[in-house]
């Protein structure tokens, strides 16, 4: 579970949510870049599900990166046009050396 630093070859962009007032008393949510990082992306599983009358492909991945304290389930990772929603983030051995995230990519 401790990949060599050389396996973290994918450059990902960490994005955090930003609430913007919509002028009607509510807010709209968008995402803004928080930082860039090197990571290892490993495919875990995939399935097809129907949502709102159309099929979607759901793929689950494990992302391993250097430890950072600002990664949580409300953020997402971007690889070009691909977006990975972070579902869980944990430091597997408590050493603050690596952070392992379980992420989902949804493609229509």
Image: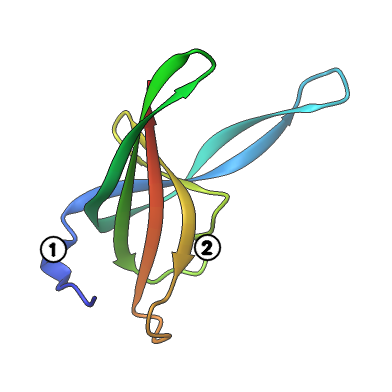
State the residue position of label 1. 7
Task: Give the number of marks.
Answer: 2
**Secondary element at tag 2:** loop
Q: Residue at x 48, y 59 (%)?
A: 88
Q: Is residue 87 above or below residue 5?
A: above
Point 39% across, 24% down: residue: 56
Residue 28 image point, x, y percent: 70, 27
Residue 85: where, in percent of width, then height? 45, 43
Q: Residues within 10 Å of mark 1 (few under 14, many from 20)?
A: few
Determine whether 23 is above or below 81 in the image.
above
Whole-percent x, y for residue 40 in the image: 22, 58
Residue extending farthest to the top is 53
Which quarter of the figure has residue 13?
top left
Under tag 1, what secondary structure?
Answer: helix
- Contact? badges 1 and 2 (CB < 8 Å): no
- Closer to us: mark 1 or mark 2? 1
- On the image, numbered disc 2 is attached to which residue? 70
Is residue 17 placed above or below 92 in the rendered structure?
above
Q: Is residue 40 left or right of residue 37?
A: left
Q: Say few, some or many: other residues with alpha carbon within 10 Å of mark 2 (under 14 / 14 to 19 / 20 or more).
A: few
Q: What quarter of the picture does the C terminus occupy?
A: top left
Image quadrant containing the N terminus: bottom left
Return the residue nearer the eye: 89 or 49. 49
The Cα atoms of the two marked residues, 1 and 2, are separated by 22 Å
Task: Write down the quadrant of residue 9 in the picture.
Answer: bottom left
Give the mark, 1 or 2, whose residue is nearer the N terminus: 1
Residue at image x 40%, y 81%? Answer: 96
């Amino acid at each position: 579970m401790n990949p060599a630093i050389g396996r973290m070859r994918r450059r990902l962009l960490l994005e955090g949510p930003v609430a913007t007032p919509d002028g009607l008393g509510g807010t709209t949510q968008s995402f803004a870049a928080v930082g860039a990082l090197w990571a290892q992306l490993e495919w875990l599983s995939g399935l097809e599900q129907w949502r709102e009358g159309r099929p979607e492909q759901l793929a689950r991945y494990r992302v391993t990166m250097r430890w950072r304290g600002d990664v949580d389930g409300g953020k997402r990772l971007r690889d070009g046009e691909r977006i990975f929603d972070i579902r869980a983030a944990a430091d597997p051995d408590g050493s603050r050396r690596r952070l392992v995230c379980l992420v989902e990519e949804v493609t229509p």
